[in-house]
Amino acid sequence: MDERMSSVDKPQPEAERGTLPDAPLAMPKQVLTASSGFSLRKLFGQRTLKTGS
Amino acid sequence: MAAMTARRGAFFPRALGLVLSLLAAGGAFMLFLQFGWSDGLDAMDIVRAAFILISTFWLAWGAVQAVLGLMSRPHAPPLPPFTGLKSKTAILVPVYNEDPVTVYSRIAAMDASLKATGQAEHFHFAILSDTRKDDIALLEREWFEKLMDARDAEGRMFYRRRANNKGRKAGNIEDFFQRSGGAYDFALILDADSLMDGGTIVEMARRMEADPELGLLQTLPKVTRANARFGRAMQFSASFHSPIFARGLAMMQGDTGPFWGHNAIVRCRAFAESCGLPELPGKPPFGGHIMSHDYVEAALLARAGWTVRLDDDLEGSFEEGPENIVDHAKRDRRWCQGNLQHSKIVGAPGLRAWNRFVFVQGILSYISPLFWLGFIISSIFAPWFAPPVNYFPVEGWPFPIFPSDETWKAIGLAIGIFGLLFLPKLMVAADAITSGRAKEFGGSWLVLSSTFVELVFSSITAPILMMFQTRSVMQVVFGADGGWPTNNRGDGTLSVGESWTATWWIVITGIVVLGCTWIFVPGLVPWLLPIAVPMILAPFVVSWTSQRSTTRLFQTPRDLDPAPVMMLQDRFLAAWQVETHAEAPVHSQTVQA
């Protein structure tokens, strides 16, 4: 966390003033439309809990 | 484990809410059927009873939220002793053709408020512009330089303008995550009119650090700075009633929401992994970009196993609202399209059952006026469908049998429906008086007066809002895309002429409906007057309610005791507005908080 903070806080001399830090995060597109057919199992399917910051 | 506990904790409120609402709806349905039975049941009676069933369920659902909210009090979750933040949070301020001076004065105030907490180094601000008007974009960039100088914000404040505004606000936020999300643990998502106290922001980051399963934490923003009669009535309702209703809603939603799109903090990794929104198949209004993205993002986080929570004990969260009915209707048009679009998402694989129900609830909130309208119209035409009264129903019985008078059942039903509308607000007022909360709103007498006037006020404006909502639903159903209009901020005073331009079709509808009733079912006229009269007088109602309020009514705690961050914003704004009005060359002015 500390390393990341220092890299963000560094001034960016080559970029325009106030340019956002370059630290991409992938954002995969989610599936929102039901695949073929209706199924109660799909509708109320089990999910696993995720943890960690 | 915390999520499982929250899920178990939500079972009782959910079950209670559903059972009570179904009982109320079923009772109203049966009562209306009995009323219809008195002169011979016909098809139109069954149609009207069905309209009553759905409408009463929706009203009862709202009332139950208030009852649940009154059964609890705001409380903070248990937290370890605070030893300072360890995380990094980006405060995201999406803007779209807004006045940069006002928006930046809020940012400067929040920055100053954060500085006072001693935790400012853990926060950055990112202004995410989707502005399409080049003159406003130029001002945004120009004033960003002034903001940076004023707040000595090198390396802490950022500005970027997208070349295209694909995906609107959701796309704007998504673009930030894809570009810079990896630099932060959390992101506080705001609206351009959001204002949050530094202490509240720090507390939100602290709660996110303390609970690694927490994907999103929503605050309950209070509406502030309203001046017009309509705006102040809404502000009072948002400040006085909404916390109770929202607490009831949060009890039912448990760990699955809600998310209202702003004044909420998200865990960057959770949000990025779970909330990449695809375009829906087909053309707008149902296909294309997801408009009301917040509900969907909450559902996606919950689907991935993250907790989505509303902490209603967090104060210091503010927003501004529309000042008049027309601006309210414009915003509502966008929300209507967004909620009806959820009909395409409600069957998405893997969603939690309650999130699906929330989508249905959102859809119902917009189509429910159609059920009332359907009930009124079917009541006007009901006499045509009624069979002639049969005084000799028993074969061979020589004496006439007169239909029983069920008028009292109809009156009882009307009282019950009005009770569901008014009782929750009266209960909130009674609770405020007995708990001492009324003092924050100017005392018991002022709370009672404001509550009573708000009930009258909302009864008068409801038919007009119902017509706007009905039009929105019809436009969406028939394929009209509402686009992405800029929000109107500031003074929203409307003349009668301007109001007529926006409401003439409501006036004509009111006259036609009242005229038809007068001709065909004169007995219904008294029942229809409370709806038809405000519709016929809509231009005057809209104009009058848009005028500046000069009474003490609708007083809120922030009127009596403005939050420090609000006063900070006033100081920045006042100083910068002097600059904008100066004819001399503009120089940056440093304002120290």
Image (tube, coloured by chain):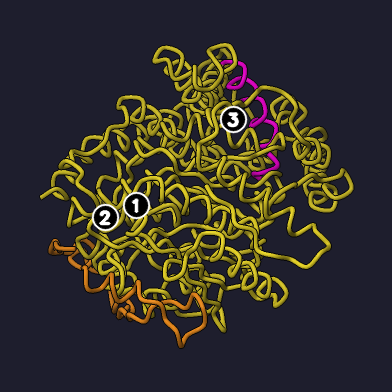
Chain colours: A orange, B yellow
Q: For mark 1, does the 10 Å Cα neighbourhood hold few (<14), some (14 to 19), or many (20 or more) residues?
A: few
Name which residue lies at 83% across and 62% down. Answer: B583
Residue topped by disc 2: B353
Q: Nearer the viewer, residue A19 or B578?
A: B578
Name which residue lies at 44% across and 20% down. Answer: B437
Say what amino acid the circle numbered 1 marks. Phe
Name which residue lies at 65% across and 76% down. Answer: B132
Say what amino acid the circle numbered 2 marks. Ala
Q: Quadrant of residue B403?
A: top right
Say what amino acid the circle numbered 3 marks. Asp
Write down the region rendered in magenta: B448-466
Q: Disc 3 to disc 1, how far (Cα)?
A: 37 Å
Q: Nearer the viewer, residue B105 or B24?
A: B105
Q: Is residue B451 left or right of residue B493?
A: left
Q: Which sits earlier in the primary sequence, circle 2 or circle 3?
A: 2
Residue topped by disc 1: B357
Relative image position of residue A33 (x, y in whole percent): 35, 74
